[in-house]
Image (tube, grey):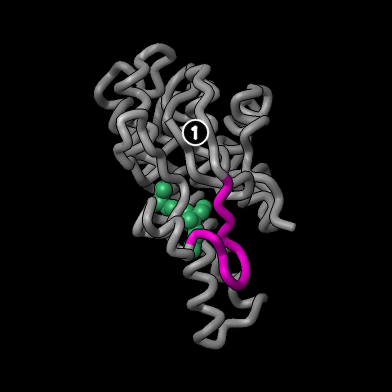
Amino acid sequence: MKLYGNEISSAVSRVRIALALKGLDVESQSIGFLGEGAENRQPGYLAVNPQGLVPALVTDEGDLVTQSLAIIEYLEELFPDHPLLPSNPVDRAWARALALSVASEIHALMPVRVANRLRASGFSADDIGAWNRHWMTEGFDAIEARLASRPKTLYAAGDTPSLADIVLFPQAVNVERAGLPLADRWPRIAAIVDRLSAIPAFSQNAPAIRK
Ligand SMILES: N[C@@H](CCC(=O)N[C@@H](CS)C(=O)NCC(=O)O)C(=O)O
């Protein structure tokens, strides 16, 4: 298998954490997405993934699997050891819901292509920062409220790390980097992220800081 991605992407970080939790090692190829002539928009990469996004996984059979959540579920089906989804259907639905609420309701509003479009529409760097913080705050407020309404567990969807934590963690790292300290507003998320930070599969695969 070959993973196309890079060190700074939080969507790729999700897949790297899932691979590490399952103890899997795959070939990887770095695809940059910043600046003029970004590799993800070049014909070479578009031939691999026409959507031009990372992560993308090419299987040993040559099949393309895109979208971080689909890639993680593919890995889960292929390598069921160290399960990433809770066994109880309600907890499993919650783990997926939390993952989607980060991937679709927070992260999707602020990747490079969205920032580029906002800039082209006249947003300043400060405006874009405020845009990102707005969606991060709204999204994390909702996740914090859902966590508060559920029985207290060590991690986001139970007492072992799951898909929910795999998607929450990289976003939480970026929320802190955006100047929103988790502990100030989201104590439950902060406690979970503290525990996750002590697990090498998470800490070693956090999104790297953009230079
Ligand atoms: N929903 C996709 C999101 C993928 C995505 O937006 N990846 C970012 C990196 S974190 C990317 O490729 N950005 C390039 C761009 O926006 O042009 C997933 O979960 O895989």
Q: Residue at x 40, y 12 (%)?
A: 81
The residue that label 1 is drawn on is: 166
Q: Is residue 19 above or below residue 66?
A: above
Q: Residue at x 53, y 74 (%)?
A: 116
- Residue furthest to the bottom: 122
Q: Nearer the viewer, residue 139 or 51?
A: 51
Which of the image's four quarters has the C terminus?
A: bottom right
Q: Residue at x 61, y 51 (%)?
A: 175
Tell me where residue 192 appears, x and y as whole percent: 58, 30
- Residue furthest to the right: 211
Tell me where residue 159 appears, x and y as whole percent: 48, 17
| 116 part of magenta stretch | no
Tell me where residue 61 appears, x and y as whole percent: 30, 30
Q: Quadrant of residue 210?
A: bottom right
Q: Nearer the viewer, residue 52 or 135?
A: 52
Q: Answer few, some or many: residues within 10 Å of disc 1's Cα (few below 14, many 20 plus, some between 14 and 19).
A: many
- Residue furthest to the left: 89
Residues rendered magenta in the picture: 30-40
Q: Is residue 135 above or below residue 206?
A: below
